[in-house]
Image (cartoon, coloured by chain):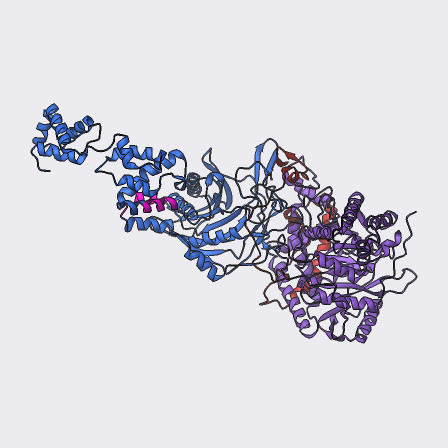
Amino acid sequence: MNDLASLSATALRSAAARGEVSVREIVEAHLARIASFDPLLHAFLGVDEAGARAAAGALDAARARGEPAGPLFGVPVALKDNLCVRGWETTCGSRILRGFRPPYEATAVARLRAAGAVLLGRTNLDEFAMGSSTENSAFGPTRNPWDPSRAPGGSSGGSAAAVAARLAALALGSDTGGSIRQPAALCGVVGVKPTYGRVSRYGLVAFGSSLDQIGPLARTVEDAAAALSVIAGRDSNDSTSVADAVPDYLSALGRGVEGLRLGLPREYFPPDLDPEIRGALERCLERLRGLGATVEEISLPHASAAIPTYYIVATSEASSNLARYDGVKYGLREGGDGDLRAMYGRTRGRGFGAEVKRRILLGTFALSSGYYEAYYGRALRARALLRRDFDEAFRRVDLLLAPTSPFPAFRLGEKLDDPIQMYLCDVFTVTANLVGLPAVSVPAGFTRARRDAPELPIGVQVFGRPLAEADCLRAAAAIERACPVADRAPALAADP
Amino acid sequence: MVEYEPTIGLETHVQLRTRTKLFCGCASAFGAPPNTLVCPICAGLPGTLPALNRAAFEAAVRASLALRCEIAPETKFDRKNYFYPDLPKGYQISQYDAPLSRNGRLLLADGSVVHIRRAHLEEDAGKAIHDRGDRTLVDFNRCGIPLLEVVTEPDFHTAAQAVAYLVLLRRTMRYVGASECDMEKGSLRCDVNVSLAPSGAPPGTRVEVKNLNSFRMVGRAIEHETARQREVLARGGAVEQETRLWRDAQGVTAPMRSKEEAHDYRYFPEPDLPPFHAPAAWVERLRSELPELPAERRARFERAVGLPSEAAETLTAERGLADYFEALAGACGDARAAANWVAGEVCRELNERKIEIEEFPLGPPALARLLALVPDRVSVGAARAIFRRLVESPASDPAALAASMGLEQLSDVSAIEAACREALAAAPRAAEEFRAGKGKALDSLVGRVMGATKGRANPRLVQETLRRLLGSPA
Amino acid sequence: MPRMDPREAIAGVARLARLDLEPAEGERIAAQLGDILRHFESIRALPTEGVAPIVHATPGADVFRPDEPLPSLPREEVLGNAPEAEGGFFAVPKVVEA
């Protein structure tokens, strides 16, 4: 039964829709793997075994009645624990939200359910999605399935690890500055950050509202495309969701890259780039050229402004978004016997972890009287400069290619005490969020094994024009075929 | 001694008339049990997002046009960040540097112009109740109710002017259907800014006074705050820039208890809402659909209809009342009589029944039929009695009612003459006095005739007949 | 760009953000924020004069909701996550601010 977990989401869906395997069997296979491997990996903060089994039973019964199978029929999905699911706890990896059960459901989650997906459980994350290693979770870190002494990346580290370790066929994450793509790269899976507004944010606990997007993590580009087809589209509950029709992302995947003009942003290949990552990118490009793509170097002149711009915008918005955690309505309350002011300060002081506090303080400062123009105001203008860079680039090329992460998976604790080093994990990913572009990270190879490290996955990132997810996925599918890694699974020792 | 002149500005929150809240589908209603008109969005639950109510936006534009404001072609929302338990998101969605409209004006009855600096849309906060033991209790029903904040220039120098502005603002909002402006339900709330300075000098330190829930309170608070600042300055002291609360029971303003660090609301653009546009053609259509507004209507009633200013003021209090008056005046052809009846009898009935003119059972045509009987067929007094019956059974015919109530005027000349002769015989002194030139004596004779005929005699005929019998020209 | 001593500013910002910090924590965060802001100084050099700010990454506008009522939550659900409720209200410590 365990081999069911090695099938792709699309393969599982076909087998289940045809009745070759029951949804119940699929779900049991994944629950069994979770029981075996999650004690080591800690990808999940909660597993809804009863709910998953009930959903599986209902789907099997629906099939028996001859009802049509949805596009994700029988596919077991893991959800980052910042997505609201009716009846589940939603903690965002924070003490301050512990015990919070939303009386409503995220649009993307409701769409997954309607498509026949089975919701397995909620995955670990950096607290409020703030981090690049999943070590900022109040409930302990997640481990990278390729090397459990290393971080899975973050903030959607639980989702990436769950998919890489075949604990779930598919997962949703959220990406504010790379939080889907970077862990996808570090865990060797596909991660999609859609165009801002392509997927409704309703029910995604906000971090940086103008940057956040929900997207899929999957083991194949096809699976990611199938999931994106389900969750994308206008939602009247999200005024920033775009109304454009959702194209058929699956149909574009086989078209190859012939005739596509690919741009390499020179600024994303700095001299100190990890040589193995550079090497993997170069091998990948060589193959794409061989398949008929043209490759040219381009420039994004303001690239160095991306990290400060991103951290000012994201923390400013976060300082406001996280004001609601005050001990009044839900979650943690501390100091409730004193006066109101004391309760606020204590609840927030004890409820938030160090990184979240740093960011709230940074954002509060950046918006405060006398500093607004110098920080937040300037960052909004810098954002416009970054957009110009991309507009210019997309006049010459169709897609941009770059490394997803400047380095492969790092050791747990390695960057934890150095916020700036941690922030630099996002150097290649934040701009897509600032400009609102779609970007897909796809595995492009592995590092060589060393004395102190096994082979570790390397991801390449494809950026497209706004709403050009289909082009990004098409190129990602070509990379997937040219640099095949999907059949490699991390070798996990079952918990004794 | 230096004469200090007060300068007063008003910030008024007008609750817009919509079915639902500004950013969610909860009913925008008053008086529901606590926390029963709340959904994940207005409760500010993590992950929820606002979606702007089209009707609120349109009502705000209509209200702004009625205040003769310029409508911004593009407007946006901002977050105003502060912590308070009645603010579930920790920020209020408001408008900061791109308000919906600016530069309006309202013309008061005394001819003075109030300049409107700006009007912007925002969501209301909830309600915190502080007088329950050691806990503060919070109700979110009001969270997200759509408000238009209307800010005047500091154009007022007396409490009376400020109150006159509020009265007219309320009327204007009600005329265009933008708001009920019901102060009892909190749908019109007002903060005032008062500063004092020697006449001619630039305005002094501004003090904001909050917690004003009626026109009366606004007036009293301004009077009190003006007197307080005058006293401070007279003592040689300095007025502190602060926010004070009106304590109605004591009739004083008092500093707010919390003197926390200077507010820093950290306004920034609301990322969850796109910009909104008011296309010129749409704005022009709304403008063309505006009714005649109370200030203009009052002026027209005075000038063109010739009503006394008090009647014009009363009749334009509500759009429906003015409409009723105009329909009645048209139907009966006598604007003065129509004005007296509407301002008098009709308004009295409305007050007694606590209903709006729209609910008044007697339409202008029916009332006009009654008025047509006055004075030849029924007396004014009789008409009032018929009116009260008519309100009970509006389908009745006024003439038939007059007959059945025995109130039809006695116009039979011989019967009236007989009654007059009887009166003269019964009161020879009055007759003498009249002949001696005391005109007033006629009144008592008329009164006798009216009494004898149970008020039914046509008073004009009675007068004529008495004069004839007394040998005096009519 | 205004200069600031993070150690000085941190206490005020923490008050504004309603975050109680342990003294050692405040020291550490002040130092880190100082480093971060120094790192962010590069944004000063950007030619942002005359550049219109971007708030929204995607150029949407005029997204309205019809004025049609939707059901509110049952009160049990409104108050279901509340640390303290009383008689249908959320209950909090009395507002006494120094």
Tell me the quarter of the image containing the C terminus of chain B. top left
Q: Position of residue A147 (x, y in %)?
A: 87, 56
Residue C2 visible to an observer of this rendering: no
Q: Is residue B263 left or right of residue B308?
A: right
Q: Quadrant of residue A219?
A: bottom right
Tell me the quarter of the image containing the N terminus of chain B. top left
* Chain C visual colour: red
Residue B404 visible to an observer of this rendering: yes
Highlighted magenta segment, given as a residue range: B306-327
Q: Position of residue B392 (x, y in %)?
A: 36, 33
Q: Position of residue B276 (x, y in %)?
A: 54, 58
Q: Is residue B214 left or right of residue A46?
A: left
Q: Is residue B257 above or below residue C10?
A: above
**Nearest the camera: B325 or A434?**
B325
Q: Is residue C47 above or below residue B39?
A: below
* Chain A visual colour: purple
Q: Quadrant of residue B418?
A: top left
Q: Main secondary structure of the magenta part?
A: helix
**Nearest the camera: A144 or B220?**
A144
Q: Which chain is blue?
A: B
Q: Is residue C84 left or right of residue B63?
A: right
Residue furthest toward the front? A66
